[in-house]
Amino acid sequence: MKIDFLYFEDCPSHDQALARLRQVMAEEGVEAAIAIHKMETETQVQAWNFVGSPTILIDGEDIDPPPPGTPAALACRVYRWEDGRISPLPSPEMIRRALRSRLHREEGDS
């Protein structure tokens, strides 16, 4: 499993999001390295199709895919939680669901 954590320094929630990702991984028994990418240039933004900070990709897939047409930009990101609230952080359940989905696919591949 490949996990990429993308962030923009000007968005204050990235440290808490990374801690939450690590916590959920530990709770789920997922042992994988997290590649941390600081977005600083327009070239990076376009190369990663970065839609805001923080962004978590598991095997290249966004844990909360943005709507089609969402522009790539050096910006902060918001997440809509399961209960409808808006947050600058993905919910623990959102991370958990994405990890479990990927683990389930890996089991099917073996």
Image: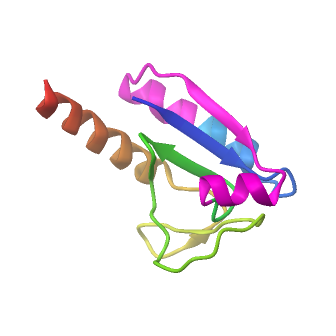
Q: Is residue 31 magenta?
A: yes
When the figure is inspected, residue 51 is found, relative to residue 95, above or below; the finding is below
When the figure is inspected, residue 66 is found, relative to residue 18, above or below; the finding is below
Q: Position of residue 67 (x, y in %)?
A: 47, 77
Q: Position of residue 15 (x, y in %)?
A: 75, 41
Q: Which of the 4 image quarters holds residue 20?
A: top right
Count of marks placed on residues: 0
Residue drawn at (41%, 67%) of the image: 82
- Report whether 26 appears left or right of 55: left
- Report whether 90 appears left or right of 36: left
Q: Position of residue 81 (x, y in %)?
A: 48, 66
Residue drawn at (47%, 35%) of the image: 24
When the figure is inspected, residue 40 is found, relative to residue 3, above or below; the finding is below
Q: Furthest-right residue in view?
A: 10
Q: Which of the 4 image quarters holds residue 72?
A: bottom right
Residue drawn at (41%, 40%) of the image: 59
Q: Position of residue 80 (x, y in %)?
A: 51, 71
Name the foreground residue: 50 vs 44. Answer: 44
- Which quadrant of the rendered structure holds the N terminus? top left
Q: Which residues are magenta?
A: 21-49
